Image (cartoon, rainbow, N blue to C red):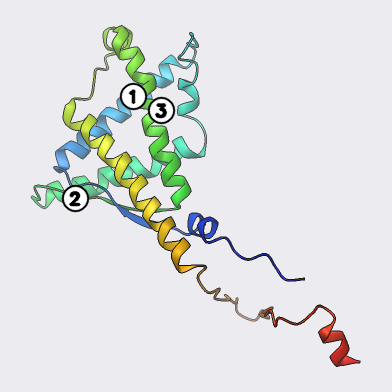
Amino acid sequence: MAAPAPDPEREAMRAAIQVELPEAPPQTYLAWVDWWRGVERVIRRLESMTSAGRGEGPMLLHGPVPGYVSRVLLEELRRQAHHAEQCGNEAVAPILRADPRMLWDAVTVLEDQARWLDGWLEDGVVSARLGLSFPGWRVELLRGRVVESVRDQIRLRLHQAAIQGPAPAIPMRRRGSMVLTLVEAGEPEGALADQLA
């Protein structure tokens, strides 16, 4: 029985891709990262609050995707923006390399966290009691551009993968291990048994 044909879209979502984020002054990326660190502190302080419409907030800090946003995405933005600033560059377009599904989910978390926090900021609760305010229009504009750019690049990669079809499999071999490659010959299942008899 032949193996099912690989799904190019599914395969494309598994392979790491590289995305280039929108160009902006390094100071804007650094301000976004600093603001987001403040958001994380505030959400941690609000975890016990589960009032109507805000109960999903704490879940935005826990799990693999928020962990990726906090430990990888934000730190990579900080590193590249800081380097650009140190070099005197007026702009930086950070480059991220990750699994497309993780990137998609990460920008979704960024949107969800921003939407959740907007409710608190509009009430004045966060800004008055916890010392966090709106990030400023430049940071908010950049966040929206990053989300849109990442999604557009992922869609483009998926479209390209669907057009090109599956990439040829390259068998990888560890030292000293045997490589078994199955090749579909287009013959019925019993063809090999008939040839051996």
Q: Which residue is mark 1?
A: 39
**Mark 1 Cα within 10 Å, few/some/many (few <14, many 20+)?**
many
Callout in the foreground (2, 3): 3
For image coordinates 47% across by 61% down, the residue present is 162
Which quarter of the figure is the N terminus placed in? bottom right
SS for dot 2: helix
154 with respect to 12 (left or right):
left
Q: Amino acid at mark 3?
A: Asp
163 with respect to 19 (left or right):
right
For image coordinates 27% across by 14% down, the residue present is 131
**Mark 3 Cα within 10 Å, few/some/many (few <14, many 20+)?**
some
Residue 150 x/y as whole percent: 34, 46
Q: Quadrant of residue 147?
A: top left
In this picture, is 181 found above or below 127?
Answer: below
Q: Which label sits on residue 83?
A: 2
Residue 174 x/y as whole percent: 60, 76
Q: Which residue is mark 3?
A: 112
Ranked by sequence position, the earlier of labels 2 and 1 is 1
SS for dot 3: helix
Which quarter of the figure is the C terminus placed in? bottom right
Ranked by sequence position, the earlier of labels 1 and 3 is 1
In this picture, is 180 found above or below 87?
Answer: below
SS for dot 1: helix
For image coordinates 28% across by 41% down, the residue present is 146
Proximity of marks 2 and 3: CB atoms separated by less than 8 Å: no
Ranked by sequence position, the earlier of labels 2 and 3 is 2
Proximity of marks 1 and 3: CB atoms separated by less than 8 Å: no
In this picture, is 150 found above or below 62?
Answer: below
Compare residues 184 and 97 and report the one nearer the observer. Answer: 184
Q: Which label sits on residue 29?
A: none
Residue 21 x/y as whole percent: 26, 48
